[in-house]
Image (cartoon, helix red, strand yellow):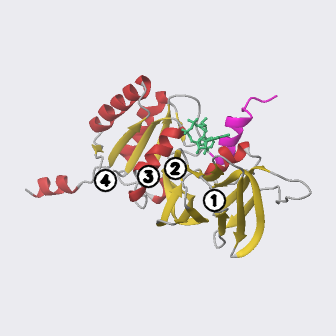
Amino acid sequence: MMEMKHAAEVYALTFYIHHRGDELSRQLAESFRQQAEQKGLRWCAEEPDIVVSIGGDGTLLQAFHTYFNKVDHVAFVGVHTGHLGFYADWKPHEIELLIDCMASHPKPDPHSIVEYPIVEITAESDDGSETFYALNEVTLKGIETTFVAQLNINDEKFEMFRGDGICISSPSGSTAYNKALGGAMIHPSLEAVQIAEIASINNRIYRTLGSSIVLPKHHHCDIYPEEGKRLLLSIDHIYKEYPKLRGLSVRVADVKVKFVRYRPFPFWNRVRDAFIGNESN
Ligand code: NAD
């Protein structure tokens, strides 16, 4: 009787798999589940300790948004079935090793978790206010006309922006869209958000800073778009039209996203491997 009670108390790590839906990712997900259950891990879609994303960075973004309401206790790990991802850094042939790591850490402990800052935005519209969280970035763009908006930093007017739009990225998202805009790569240990311009208009009449800026955690930026314009808001891979947006308030979120890190893969090595290649030349 005592032995049975003891056995019942042994905690089995719970996991869920979110995959991209293509044949390779689907097969890998099936094989992952079988092997993981054989090693004592427990499948649980409602309250997983770990969400395994199989696909690419886009798949991990989807997993993040699906499980955002449990962001305080769920940790993510990504397996890539295409090219090396920033979030999806385990290779398909390494899933046995990943399962062994999960099985040998019955509860994700602080040593196997890294936490990254995310972006918080609050959108005020005629219909009320809504708060969203982005793992990579938020963008705001005009739909039919040039995007015109006043940017305030810490409640003081900073500039009047005219152009295609504004991109606000997290440190781990700085290597995504923000990079294509000429923004800096920010190490995810820095609690910051980066505001980058998307094709600003700069001439004798209109002037913006022209460089991206990095805000620390205790600062915020408010964006007040010209009234009556159709606007497109993106939150990572999710796009929504905001016809009656009055303002957007942007800051570093109080919550962070957790990733399981069973082996070191320093951020700068990921940047090098993804954008430069690690061949010595
Ligand atoms: P997608 O699948 O086309 O992904 C776009 C690319 O971005 C992929 O190669 C992916 O690996 C890469 N990526 C995603 N997150 C990254 C990160 N943090 N660091 C480095 N690379 C990263 O599109 P999706 O699945 O809809 O993904 C949405 C993401 O696409 C957005 O969050 C945005 O960052 C990115 N995006 C980039 C551009 C651009 O670079 N011009 C334009 C639009 C969107």
**Front in this rendered view, residue 39 or 200:** 200
- Mark 2: give few (<14), some (14-19) or many (20+) Cα within 10 Å: few
Q: Secondary structure at mark 4?
A: loop
Give the residue drawn at x 62%, y 52%.
139
Q: Secondary structure at mark 1?
A: loop
Give the label on residue 75, or none: 3
Real-space CA distance between mark 2 and mark 3, rounded to the nearest whole angstrom = 27 Å
Q: Which residue is mark 4?
A: 47
* Residue that lies at the very extreme toward the top in this rendered image: 23
Q: Which residue is mark 2?
A: 240
Left or right of residue 132: residue 205: right
* Residue that lies at the very extreme toward the right in this rendered image: 204
Relative to residue 111, is residue 31 depicted above or below? Answer: above
Real-space CA distance between mark 3 and mark 4, rounded to the nearest whole angstrom = 11 Å
The answer to whether the residue labelled 2 contacts the one labelled 3, judged by CB atoms less than 8 Å apart, is no
Real-space CA distance between mark 1 and mark 3, rounded to the nearest whole angstrom = 17 Å
Dividing the image into 4 quarters, which one contains the C terminus? top right
Instruction: Give percent across and percent down for residue 223.
Output: 66, 64
Real-space CA distance between mark 2 and mark 4, rounded to the nearest whole angstrom = 28 Å
Instruction: Give percent across and percent down for residue 14.
Output: 31, 48
Real-space CA distance between mark 1 and mark 2, rounded to the nearest whole angstrom = 30 Å
Relative to residue 142, is residue 84 depicted above or below? Answer: above
The answer to whether the residue labelled 1 contacts the one labelled 4, judged by CB atoms less than 8 Å apart, is no
Dividing the image into 4 quarters, which one contains the N terminus? bottom left
Residue range of the region highlighted in magenta in the rendering: 266-281
* Residue that lies at the very extreme toward the bottom in this rendered image: 155
The answer to whether the residue labelled 3 contacts the one labelled 4, judged by CB atoms less than 8 Å apart, is no
